[in-house]
Image (tube, rainbow, N blue to C red):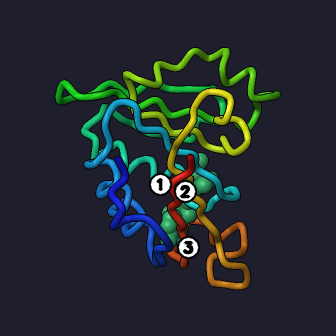
Amino acid sequence: MVPDRLLGAHDISTSDEMEELGRAIGSELAAGDLIVLTGPLGAGKTTLTRGIAEGMGVRGPVQSPTFVIARTHPSLTGGAPLVHADAYRLGDAAELEDLDIDLDGSVVIVEWGRGAVDAIADSWWDIEIERPVGEAGDAPEDLDLDAPRRLVITRVG
Ligand SMILES: Nc1ncnc2c1ncn2[C@@H]1O[C@H](COP(=O)(O)OP(=O)(O)O)[C@@H](O)[C@H]1O
Ligand SMILES: [Mg+2]
């Protein structure tokens, strides 16, 4: 479960802070929990997921799943695995269903999953990350520089 105290908006100043929030979330997750992650390229989706993986105690490394549809990170502590999926190149929701992800036995994070997870689940947490425009870090060459992000966590369903 993502605890209620973490619901709502978070202003995140650095990538370290993003990982720290991820660790706080990850340490509370259990098998059956599903998170949908939305945000533009470079928003920090993978950075957040890296923190979640650390908080869960699963094997890394967490990488952008762009070249695989889903990657499973087994637990290092006998807990639930993390399935990190990318719905970006899935044609439709049916293809997400075809992946046959073990939703009950894993923690599942689906990047770009909005509008697709409805096919496989009744409830989940929606996390949206925004990069404010016109801030430092806006130019492509500044992508790695610490810059503000706004993250909003909502319970759906
Ligand atoms: N406040 C912040 N939160 C998260 N990442 C940040 C922040 N400021 C700068 N960054 C940088 O932005 C990039 C985010 O990349 P990544 O997590 O791969 O994004 P995405 O998976 O959304 O495309 C990283 O290079 C990270 O260092
Ligand atoms: Mg990514």
Cβ of disc 3 within 8 Å of ligand 1?
A: yes
Residue found 23% across the figure and 28% down from its top = 79
Nearest to N terminus: mark 3 or mark 1: 1
Along the line of sight, which residue is nearer the eye, 132 or 155?
155
**Disc 2, SS:** strand
Position of 75 with respect to 127 (left or right) is left
Residue found 50% across the figure and 26% down from its top = 71
Which mark is in front, 3 or 1? 3
Nearest to N terminus: mark 3 or mark 2: 2
Q: Which residue is mark 3?
A: 149
What is the spatial separation of the Cα atoms under label 1 and label 2, in whole angstroms? 13 Å
What is the spatial separation of the Cα atoms under label 3 and label 1, in whole angstroms? 12 Å
Of the four image quadrants, the one with ligand 1 is bottom right
Q: Residues within 10 Å of mark 1 (few under 14, many from 20)?
A: many
Residue found 32% across the figure and 24% down from its top = 74
Tag shown at residue 127: 2
Residue 27 percent location from the top left of the image: 26, 48
Q: Which residue is mark 1?
A: 47
Position of 51 with respect to 115 (left or right) is left
Cβ of disc 1 within 8 Å of ligand 1?
A: yes
What amino acid type should be assigned to the residue bearing mark 1? Thr
Residue found 54% across the figure and 78% down from its top = 148
What amino acid type should be assigned to the residue bearing mark 2? Ile
Residue 16 percent location from the top left of the image: 37, 66
Q: Residues within 10 Å of mark 3 (few under 14, many from 20)?
A: some
Q: Where is residue 66, by image quadrant?
A: top right
**Disc 3, SS:** strand
Q: CB atoms at circles 3 and 2 under 8 Å apart?
A: no
Q: Is residue 132 above or below residue 110?
A: below
